[in-house]
Image (cartoon, helix red, strand yellow):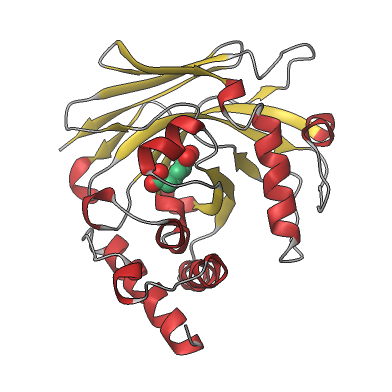
């Protein structure tokens, strides 16, 4: 794809999000779209958001669990960015009409005390510099028809990022084994999805390490203080108006929101 087409595709994705409108996936018109070009479209999309004064909260990993890869029929983890205007306060409301076809998933976020730069970063290295952990509810809202896409499509679409609810951040507990921690997603009091941290590439810290190594290809690093989402532990659940949603991360805390219309 040439530079003009990359920019134009980013603009179409930007407008689809702004206008809450589904679009035909990019790979219909560009079946040869590569992962590399998809990240270039994502970069253009990020630039558009930054230009309009929207700041980055931090990066996120996506499709890091088997459940997510199977659900979305995609084979490989991806990354994207969470922006300031995506944040919904804990216990707050999300209006279903502001979104296209939202789904929710429960995750664990990391905040590092020091920068970490790939390549070759390991989960142990990430854990050694992790200062805080945060329970997260992430609302994803693919801009593509029927929430259906291939790997390059979803990369270009900023990994379906849409809204995020952070629970209270806690100092990383000394002896907590994050791979053994149970993460539950409940809707209207009923547990709909549940898994352990190990579902996320063996350990959520491995996901942050993978991210550091992926960013290293672009000469970027994980920065101290930014919030890093490590990816849904379980499959995502479709939202409907009236839902009361909560995530519980064992030993860390919880996060919640309601869906209004
Ligand atoms: C892509 C975004 C995935 C996660 O945590 O796996 C994601 C999607 O499923 O639409 O945020
Ligand atoms: Mg996610």
Relative to 123, 148 lies left or right: left
Residue 107 in picture, x, y percent from top left: 51, 30
Residue at left offset 23%, top offset 58% = 20
Q: Nearer the viewer, residue 1 or 22?
A: 1
In the picture shown, does residue 180 fall above or below 1?
above
In the picture shown, does residue 178 fall above or below 66?
above
Q: Nearer the viewer, residue 101 or 164?
A: 101
In the picture shown, does residue 6 fall above or below 60?
below
Residue at left offset 73%, top offset 42% = 209
- Using the rendered image of the protein, determine whether residue 89 is visible from the camera's viewpoint: no
The image quadrant that residue 16 belongs to is: bottom left
Residue 14 in picture, x, y percent from top left: 36, 68
Q: Nearer the viewer, residue 72 or 212?
A: 72
Q: How many marks?
A: 0
Residue 99 in picture, x, y percent from top left: 25, 49
Relative to 93, 6 lies left or right: right
Residue 159 in picture, x, y percent from top left: 45, 52
- Using the rendered image of the protein, determine whether residue 253 is visible from the camera's viewpoint: yes
Where is the C terminus found, in terms of image quarters? top left
Residue at left offset 30%, top offset 64% = 25
Residue at left offset 76%, top offset 45% = 224
């Amino acid at each position: 794809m040439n530079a003009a087409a990359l920019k134009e595709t980013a603009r179409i994705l930007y407008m689809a999000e702004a206008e809450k409108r589904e679009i035909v996936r990019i790979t219909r018109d560009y079946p040869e779209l590569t992962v590399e070009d998809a990240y270039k479209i994502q970069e253009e999309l990020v630039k558009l958001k930054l230009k309009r004064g929207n700041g980055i909260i931090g990066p996120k990993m996506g499709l890091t669990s088997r459940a997510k890869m199977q659900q979305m029929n995609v084979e490989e983890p991806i990354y994207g960015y969470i922006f300031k205007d995506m944040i919904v306060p804990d216990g707050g409301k999300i209006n279903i009409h502001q979104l296209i076809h939202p789904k929710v998933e429960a995750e664990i976020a990391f905040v590092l005390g020091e920068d970490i730069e790939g390549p070759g970063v390991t989960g142990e290295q990430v854990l050694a510099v992790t200062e805080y952990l945060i329970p997260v509810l992430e609302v994803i809202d693919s801009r593509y028809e029927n929430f259906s896409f291939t790997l390059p499509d979803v990369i270009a679409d900023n990994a379906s990022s849409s809204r995020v609810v952070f629970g209270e951040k806690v100092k990383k507990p000394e002896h907590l084994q994050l791979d053994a921690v149970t993460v539950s997603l409940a809707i209207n009091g009923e547990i709909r999805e549940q898994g352990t941290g190990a579902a996320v590439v063996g350990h959520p810290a491995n996901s942050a390490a993978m991210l550091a190594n992926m960013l290293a290809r672009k000469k970027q690093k994980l920065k101290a203080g930014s919030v890093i989402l490590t990816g849904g532990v379980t499959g995502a659940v479709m939202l409907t108006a009236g839902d009361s949603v909560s995530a519980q991360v064992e030993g860390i805390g919880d996060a919640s929101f309601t869906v209004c219309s």
